[in-house]
Image (spheres, rainbow, N blue to C red):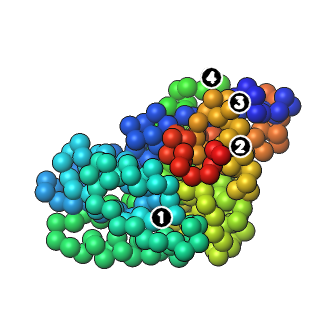
Amino acid sequence: MNKVVPDHAADVWVKLEGGNPTGSYKDRMALAIIEGAEIRGDLKPGMTVVEYTGGSTGSGLAFVCAVKGYKFHVVSSDAFAKEKLDTMRAFGAKLEVIHSPSGKINSNLINQMVDRAKELATKDDYFFSDQLNNADIIKGFEKMGREILDQIDGSIDAFTCSVGTAGAFMGVSNILLDSDKDTKIVALEPASAPYYSKNQSDGDHHVEGIGLGFELPLLDKNNYHEARGIDESEAREMAKLLASEEGIFGGTSSGLNVVGAIQLAEELGKGKTVVTIAVDTGLKYLTGNLFL
């Protein structure tokens, strides 16, 4: 990036993922989930896929299911962007929406969604993709890690991004650490829901796709050096600044990732390289207040 990073800081490179079919890096994990289940024989023609999702994973799964001919039953919430819910419906998904009284995301809401999906999964001919416990998603993101290595000329001194399922964080960090064990890896989360940075599980926030507020089964704490909380208001301001100054159009979690990356870049100083991810397109958030 050329404009939002201070002159005295390290270079910050952003992997742009908004160009995927449904506008998010979650398309990578959706394909990995479905193809992994097909290979194992867990998912067969005529079956229905069921998942709990804030919307981007669901959009990816709805897209893949539409292409491959599976029905898709999704559990989501009105705490998430209307564009994401509408996208799942457009791809033919059957959608159940759980109301969030506060309009925000917290561990109680996520657990309600998980429990409902588990209940649905007891039906005959249903396949529960269970993203939080499905290691196929890590494999889906390891390709992104290899792309980052191929696209960055020189060493990568630090990688940082937010954790939701932890699939992207684990997949990319696996590849980067295999290439250079000295790469600094930093996990990010909303400061108001600092489960990993401060061991607090009772916060809520409105950064979609991350900060679930409980232990993530796929997140290996040996894979990162530290976890940091990032202020949501800073993340939202950065999302707007990225669009207007850098031409990078993403959502709040992309802004949060860049705030965290710039913090690291200032600590490391000139001559170093920090990498993060713009996880989706800002087109998913136009009916909300992010860009107002």
Which three-letter amino acid code belongs to the residue tagged 3?
A: Glu
Q: Is residue 98 visible?
A: yes
Taking depth in this image into account, of 23 and 261 the one nearest to the observer is 23
Image x and y of residue 45, in percent: 13, 53
> Mark 2 touching mark 4, by CB under 8 A?
no
Quarter of the rendering containing residue 210 = bottom right
Which three-letter amino acid code belongs to the residue tagged 4?
A: Asp
Is tag 4's residue or tag 1's residue first in the polypeptide sequence? 1
Label of residue 78 in the image: 1
Distance between the Cα atoms at labels 3 and 4?
24 Å
Element type at mark 4? loop
Task: Please name which of the two marks, 1 or 2, marks the residue nearer to the observer.
Answer: 1
Task: Please name which of the two marks, 1 or 3, marks the residue nearer to the observer.
Answer: 1
23 left or right of 30?
A: right
Image x and y of residue 22, in percent: 40, 41
Element type at mark 1? loop
Is tag 2's residue or tag 4's residue first in the polypeptide sequence? 4
Distance between the Cα atoms at labels 3 and 2?
10 Å
Pointer 3 residue: 245
Is tag 1's residue or tag 3's residue first in the polypeptide sequence? 1
Is tag 3's residue or tag 2's residue first in the polypeptide sequence? 2
Is tag 1's residue or tag 2's residue first in the polypeptide sequence? 1
Q: Badge 1 local density, few (<14 within 10 Å), some, or many (20+)?
A: some
Label of residue 133 in the image: none
Image x and y of residue 252, in percent: 62, 49
Pointer 4 residue: 153
- x 55%, y 26%: residue: 151
Distance between the Cα atoms at labels 1 and 3?
31 Å
Distance between the Cα atoms at labels 4 and 1?
42 Å
Label of residue 238 in the image: 2
Task: Please name which of the two marks, 2 or 4, marks the residue nearer to the observer.
Answer: 2
